[in-house]
Amino acid sequence: MVQHHIYSVKQDDTLQSIAQEHHMTVEELCHYHNTHCTPLERLENKLSYQRELIIPLEKKKNIKDNSPKKVSFGPNNTLNYFPHNSFYKYGVMITIENGKEKNELKYEASVSCKKQDGDFIFQINRISKININQEEAENIAYILAYKTSQVLYPLTLLIDKDGGWKQVVPPVNYTERWNAIKEEIKKEFEGEMVEEYISKIDKLLQTPETVAHSLSDDLFIRTLFLGYCTSFEKDFTTEKQIRFPIIDNTVEPRYKVIMKVDPLLDQYNLINLEIDGFLDDIRTQADFINNSLFASEESLEQKKANPFGSIKAKAFLHPNKCIPEMIHLECSIDLEETKKISVSIADLSNAEILRVRDNRFSVLESDEDIIEITGFWEKVRSIFN
């Protein structure tokens, strides 16, 4: 039998004040009360005639413990990465701006992990179609790209002890899979563009090395596995250099960043981590425009100019495993036009209760109160603005 705490409503009470007193959001309070009360006692947007509210017993027990919990660091203030036997389902939103052109992609991906020989082996799979600019992809180019992704997914990745991307391991049978899908494409589509596309994929899939290189530009993978678990100084900051595939260059632009972790867990028992940095690459704008892998002699002789790119991120990590549950990253580089990329990733693993976490609110999603995915992402955005 489910046990509850019965709260007696006082004269000046509001839903907000009762929720705060019991360490809940208004949405949580209403959802729980309405689940267990009689139809006549259901809550709407505010208190009306209700004299008693039904509150979960575990919330009542935890009221006395208001002290924030400390992050569990290892030696040298290290965040320890323990993703063993984890499974997550993520919602992914990627916005790419290049000058005046702007495109937004949304899809879902599953992520699971096991450990082997010191590295962590992750399996990544796309579990939904790609939504482009609020619409399901119908352009032939995107349909072809989606069909091609079936060749390579599920992906196998090697991730290091810091939670950083290390290597993509191509599927052993990807050539056979591509030949089968290629025949499907030829039956469904025809024309010069299709033939050119197939030719490009044939070249991309020639060797495991070319496959791995093409997948290393995946913005979801590179954001999720940016290497958030590292050692911090006494002030809980650390300086490091990271590379990010904001442009198509074999040697990715290098950014110098300050990572800062809050030594206390937030009210949702998550680790809060922030990244702030700037482009710190020896190459000049002209070098990047010319797709140079290394700095030219002219650029080496030039006096170093102001940074022409930046990167920022905010991540919420699991308190024990240090796996990201939510991330928002923004990266930019100023060349002939300014290119900006933003990546938002949120854990959708719990199908019954979807929580969007920050210090202000938590959004519940249930069969009775469905939140559209567009509205969900607007709430994700608001956390980081």
Image: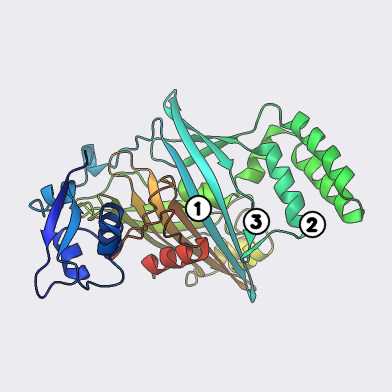
| Secondary structure category for the residue under label 3 | loop
Residue 248 is labelled as 3
Graded by Cα atoms within 10 Å as few (under 14), some (14 to 19) or many (20 or more), the crowding at tag 3 reads few
Q: Is the C-beta separation of discs 2 and 1 under 8 Å?
A: no
- Residue denoted by label 2: 140
Viewer-nearest residue: 69 or 23:
23
Residue 4 is labelled as none
Q: Alpha-carbon distance for marks 1 and 3?
A: 25 Å
| Secondary structure category for the residue under label 1 | strand
Q: Residue at x 59, y 49 (%)?
A: 218
**Horizontal and vertical percent for residue 104?**
60, 64
Q: Residue at x 69, y 40 (%)?
A: 150
- Asked whether, in this view, residue 133 is left or right of residue 2, the answer is right
**Horizontal and vertical percent for residue 93?**
53, 59
- Give the quadrant of residue 114: top left
Q: Is residue 174 above or below residue 361?
A: above
- Asked whether, in this view, residue 220 is left or right of residue 55, the answer is right
- Residue denoted by label 1: 91
Viewer-nearest residue: 105 or 187:
187
What amino acid is labelled 2 in the image?
Answer: Ile
Q: Alpha-carbon distance for marks 2 and 1?
A: 24 Å
First-in-chain label (2 vs 3):
2
What amino acid is labelled 1 in the image?
Answer: Gly
Viewer-nearest residue: 262 or 22:
22
Viewer-nearest residue: 53 or 300:
53
| Secondary structure category for the residue under label 2 | helix
**Horizontal and vertical percent for residue 11?**
9, 74
Graded by Cα atoms within 10 Å as few (under 14), some (14 to 19) or many (20 or more), the crowding at tag 2 reads few
What amino acid is labelled 3 in the image?
Answer: Asp
